Amino acid sequence: MEIIDAVILGVVQGLTEFLPVSSSGHLELGKAILGNQAVPEESLLFTVVLHFATALSTIVVFRKDIFEILKGILKFEWNDDLKFLSKIALSMTPAVIIGLLFEKQLEQLFGNNILLVGYMLIVTAILLLLADKAKNTSKEVSFSNAFIIGISQAIAMLPGISRSGATISTSVLLGNDKTKAARFSFLMVVPLIFGKIVKDIFSGDLSYNSTTFIPLCLGFAAAFVSGLFACTWMIRLVKQSKLSYFALYCTIVGIIAVIYALFN
């Protein structure tokens, strides 16, 4: 993998992991445009590195929240922090079940499946438009809400469906506070990312070549820095009800992807 390609894909991952435009869909589009011919094992390692970078940027942005949650858990009582962590665990359930039962089927949906990416980006645009019209409230995410949001996260495993877009939109449409919806959306994915990283490491499917060290490092740095920016920016955008801009973007990119796939 070329260094410039690694940096570009790192920035794409960092921005699209948090901005509601689908990181998986954009990585597929990016690989198709850049003509990335990396062998599957090397491509998987690069993907793992980028996901670790964005998970780390989430931890940095929400470091105070995470520290408070950890302090609350150590009190060993049924308090708000333990309730929040329990909701996070509940929200993970659908994605974990789907990921374990249908891993091979999901993998087959990736790999330059540009037509599917295009259609799913349009679906993402519809969700964002609906969420942008929702009224803001001060409602907290409930346990039932957490499970429903988790189902959205599982559906977002499809390339082209934005995970943050789907989960934040679902939470807002359920009547939750927009800022709290964004916070829950970003924190709920961190355990899943680290779980997937551990699984991939012990799967034996990762392949490392010393020539990829510099591209991996630069890709990691690009994803981490752009992730810090995108995560902070996205929280403000959700609060200000400016998701319609991303809906328009997803619609345009989705239509272009569909046309590209149909004529190539």
Image (cartoon, grey):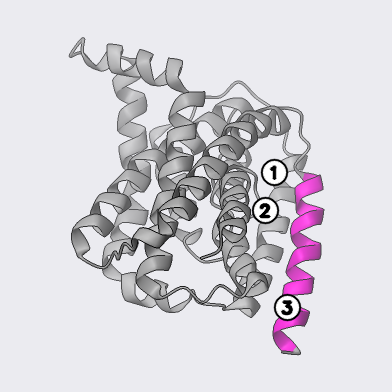
Q: Name the residue under label 2.
A: 127
Q: Is mark 1 on a helix, strand or loop?
A: helix
Say which mark, if any, is on residue 258: 3
- Which residue is found at the position 72% from the left and 57% from the top? 125
- First in residue order: circle 3 vs circle 1: 1
Tag 1 and tag 2, C-beta contact below 8 Å:
yes
Closer-to-camera residue (39/27): 39
Q: Is mark 2 on a helix, strand or loop?
A: helix
Q: Looking at the picture, which amino acid does disc 3 mark?
A: Val
Q: Which part of the image, by quadrant, shows the C terminus?
A: bottom right
Q: Name the residue under label 1.
A: 131
Depth-wise, is mark 2 or mark 3 nearer the camera? 3
Left or right of 167 in this view: 63: left
- For residue 200, which quarter of the picture? bottom left
Q: Position of residue 166 (x, y in %)?
A: 58, 50
* Magenta: main secondary structure: helix
Q: Where is residue 95 in the image (x, y as percent from the top left)?
A: 37, 55
Q: Is mark 3 on a helix, strand or loop?
A: helix
- First in residue order: circle 2 vs circle 3: 2
Q: Where is residue 33 in the image (x, y as percent from the top left)?
A: 67, 72
Whether residue 7 is situated above or below residue 121 in the rendered picture = above
Q: Looking at the picture, which amino acid does disc 2 mark?
A: Leu
Callout 1: few (<14), some (14-19), or many (20+) C-alpha neighbours within 10 Å? many
- Which residue is found at the position 55% from the left and 26% from the top? 180
> What count of labels does the image hold?
3
